[in-house]
Image (cartoon, helix red, strand yellow):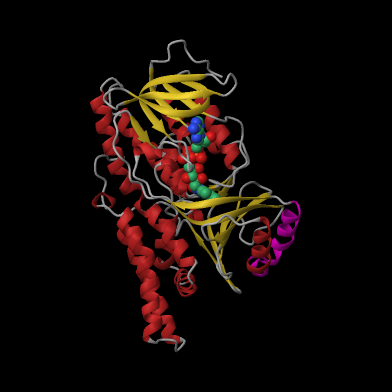
């Protein structure tokens, strides 16, 4: 562990939260010589059900930052595409539509991955580790943030760290987003996470999406012997143990392929599951000198598409790129300009990731639309090739997303006519449901800068 220097007033950046966002940006910037204080309340390995499937977009950004080695050495698994299941029908879609590309995602244990990133970050001399809980941002008389106050974990002493910039990346229950944004956070549903051991997936090295049940569930490999099953539990109230058991019995088990059933029974018998809320929180940052939000503290979307880390790494790269354009951290006005550019540029990087996540969750939770999306993707060609690049976080053009979204809605209407259910009220219902899903997302996420790269070529 790097020991804190006597006078800690010399840090360029203080990072609050050494999670996925904080540890990654520390690692990337430290390699460029930036002096960093990295603070977290807990540095030991966590058992989490979040951030276990990296889409190819996340993997590509890690490569761009020269950090792909962080995915090695802990039994992470390559993921080559998705398989979809609806009643007795299933099919798969590859991330690569032909031989011209070679994209892949990665399934992994988030705790192991995070420890690897932290270890790499802390191996740099320019990173100093602080173990404690941050309670406050320090502001000077002009309301500029100049550092933080924290309680040291072992001594329980209250201490301060001064830095020229404070990055708050303290995750989904952030204590500091209220100071730095006008966020409105909603719980869309809960995920019950279960590890299936020694379960052979019908499509090895693929994400699996199950649509037959009343609410969707997904599954993907996280090591060579384990797969993560994430079961959606709708509503804003956390399910109790009995609710979970009943939900699994009624709405999951009957719809699972046979090869999963034994593994699920075994995992439930061991009570080996975790529950997490799924949030939607569009980014609404408030510019404040000396501080910036990063990661889930700034922006969250439904995890059904595994888009979180694509957005996190996009933001890490964009913020870093702007900061590294400065000769040093001695000009507060220049730092402020760079924060403003980062908040603008991230629309282009993340609009599709955010809309896709919540739109797909909305579609998959809607009886008519989910049949439409299954049929649409099953047609193959551009109907599956376009959407998979969006899901993968590789296509940033919002017009492509909107085109496919409404094509699914029109297919639903066409299907209704085929089944002689084509009456005005059904057509109206499909159109209304589609608009209700997409409209708030478009309002929150679409900006002129969503459509083009504005301030940077990166
Ligand atoms: C159920 C679920 C499943 C998900 N699955 C996926 C997936 O498969 N793929 C994907 O890409 N994304 C997924 N996500 C999203 C992804 O996990 C997050 O976007 C990502 O972890 C956010 O990283 P972060 O650094 O912002 O937060 P975290 O990784 O949560 O880090 C926050 C850090 O801040 C520290 N901290 C908090 N408060 C303080 C304090 N006061 N003082 C000091 N330290 C503090 C915490 O200890 C923690 O280390 C999922 C999310 C959920 C909810």
| Magenta stretch in the rendered image | 252-270
Q: Residue at x 41, y 82 (%)?
A: 426
Query: How many numbered circles does the render carry?
Result: 0
Looking at the figure, which quarter contains the C terminus?
top left
Q: Residue at x 67, y 70 (%)?
A: 254
Q: Does the magenta stretch include residue 266?
A: yes
Among the 4 quarters of the image, the one containing residue 144:
top left
Is 281 located above or below residue 157 in the figure?
below
Is 279 located above or below residue 316 in the figure?
below
Is 333 located above or below residue 454 in the figure?
above
| Residue 196 placement (x, y as % from top left) | 68, 53
Q: Does the magenta stretch include residue 201?
A: no
Any part of residue 61 in sight = no
Q: Is residue 458 left or right of residue 46?
A: left
Q: Which residue is drawn at 39% across and 87% down?
A: 423
| Residue 303 placement (x, y as % from top left) | 49, 53
Q: Is residue 144 left or right of residue 67?
A: left
């Amino acid at each position: 562990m790097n020991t804190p220097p006597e006078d800690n007033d010399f840090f360029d950046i203080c990072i609050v939260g050494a999670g996925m966002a904080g540890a990654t940006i520390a690692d990337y910037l430290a390699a460029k010589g930036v002096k960093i204080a990295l603070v977290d309340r807990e540095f030991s390995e966590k058992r989490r059900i979040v951030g276990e499937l990296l889409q190819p977009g996340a993997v590509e950004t890690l490569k761009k930052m020269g950090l792909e080695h962080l995915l090695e050495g802990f039994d992470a698994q390559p993921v080559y595409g998705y398989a979809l299941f609806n009643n007795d029908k299933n099919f798969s879609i590859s991330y690569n539509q032909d031989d011209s590309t070679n994209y892949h995602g990665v399934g992994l244990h988030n705790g192991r991955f995070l420890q690897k990133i932290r270890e790499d970050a802390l191996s740099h001399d320019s990173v100093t580790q602080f173990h404690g809980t941050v309670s406050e941002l320090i502001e000077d008389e002009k309301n500029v943030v100049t550092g933080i106050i924290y309680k040291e974990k072992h001594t329980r002493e209250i201490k301060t760290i001064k830095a020229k910039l404070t990055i708050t990346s303290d995750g989904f229950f952030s204590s500091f987003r209220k100071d730095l944004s006008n966020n409105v956070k909603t719980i869309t549903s809960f995920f019950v996470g279960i590890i299936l051991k020694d379960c052979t997936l019908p499509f090895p090295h693929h994400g699996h999406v199950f649509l037959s049940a009343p609410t969707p569930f997904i599954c993907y490999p996280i090591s060579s012997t384990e797969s993560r099953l994430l079961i959606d539990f709708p509503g804003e109230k956390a399910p109790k143990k009995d609710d979970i058991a009943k939900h699994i019995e009624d709405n999951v088990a009957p719809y699972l392929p046979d090869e999963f059933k034994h593994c699920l029974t075994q995992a439930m018998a061991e009570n080996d599951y975790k529950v997490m809320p799924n949030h939607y929180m569009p980014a609404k940052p408030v510019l404040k000198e000396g501080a910036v939000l990063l990661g889930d503290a700034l922006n969250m979307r439904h995890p059904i598409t595994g888009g979180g880390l694509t957005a996190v790494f996009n933001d890490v790269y964009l913020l870093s790129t702007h900061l590294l354009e400065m000769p040093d951290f001695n000009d507060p006005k220049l730092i402020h300009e760079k924060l403003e550019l980062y908040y603008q540029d991230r629309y282009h990087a993340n609009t599709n990731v955010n809309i896709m996540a919540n739109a797909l969750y909305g579609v998959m939770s809607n009886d008519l639309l989910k049949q439409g999306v299954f049929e649409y993707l099953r047609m193959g060609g551009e109907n599956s090739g376009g959407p998979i690049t969006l899901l993968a976080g590789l296509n940033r053009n919002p017009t492509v997303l909107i085109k496919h979204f409404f094509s699914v809605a029109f297919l639903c209407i066409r299907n209704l006519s085929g089944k002689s259910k084509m009456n005005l009220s059904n057509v109206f219902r499909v159109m209304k449901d589609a608009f209700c899903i997409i409209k708030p997302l478009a309002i929150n996420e679409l900006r002129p800068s969503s459509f083009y790269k504005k301030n940077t070529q990166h």
